[in-house]
Amino acid sequence: MIDGYLWIKVLHILSATVLFGTGLGTAFHLYATHLRGDVTEIAAASRNTILADWLFTLPSGVVQPLTGLAMAWVAGFDLFESWLAASYVLYVVAAACWIRVVVLQYRVRALAEEALRGSTRLSSDYFRAMREWFVLGWPAFLSLVVVFVLMVLKPPLW
């Protein structure tokens, strides 16, 4: 029989895969759609991105720290080991960026739908929101990449 730790680990790895994959996939889709500039497609892509965030990103983002802490505790790690502490900080950075990104996605959707209804061009507010969205994606993405490295290598950092 497989012990509880391994089931927690499976859930942790699956949720990490969903979190990272959904984030990367929706970011690529929305940005590629943005670059094409079709307002109808942008409105649809932003709606789908928001939906994916609620269905996949948020639940997996909650499961990650819960299963991670559970695994560390069951395995007997000091919960304040340097690699874990660094992971907590990086996860908070990624989460803070993501929260702002979700707000921006709602703004992008509203501005695209407004342009669609009025048969007008996308506004400068839309382009500002997309620039901020793009910029915030990088620290979130890189933070999670480093968290992956820390989880696998578990290096002493200080």
Image (cartoon, helix red, strand yellow):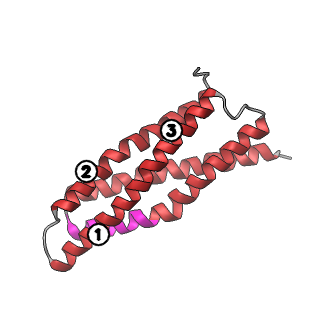
Position of the C terminus, as image quadrant, is top right
Majority SS type along the magenta span: helix
Q: Is residue 29 left or right of residue 73?
A: left
CA distance separating discs 1 and 3: 31 Å
Residue 42 percent across, percent down from the top left: 27, 65
Q: Residue furthest right?
A: 1
Q: Give the quarter of the image for residue 151.
A: top right
Whether tag 3 and tag 2 are in contact, CB under 8 A, the answer is no
- The answer, for residue 26, to whether it is visible in the render is no
Q: Earlier in the sequence, mark 3 or mark 2?
A: 3
CA distance separating discs 2 and 1: 17 Å
Residue drawn at point x = 47 percent, y = 54 percent? 22
Residue 45 percent across, percent down from the top left: 33, 65
Based on the picture, tell me whether residue 80 belongs to the magenta stretch.
no
Magenta stretch: give its range: 38-51
**Can you tell which mark lies on residue 131?**
2
Residue drawn at point x = 34 percent, y = 59 percent? 104
Look at mark 3 in the image and give the residue it sits on. Answer: 90
Circle nearer the viewer, 1 or 3:
3
Look at mark 1 in the image and give the residue it sits on. Answer: 43
Element under disc 3: helix
Element under disc 2: helix
Badge 1 amino acid: Ala
Residue 125, compared with residue 84, is above or below; it is below
Residue 136, compared with residue 52, is above or below; it is above
Q: Residue furthest left?
A: 120
- The answer, for residue 56, to whether it is visible in the render is yes
Badge 2 amino acid: Arg
Residue 34 percent across, percent down from the top left: 24, 58
Residue drawn at point x = 32 percent, y = 52 percent? 133
Residue 4 percent across, percent down from the top left: 80, 47
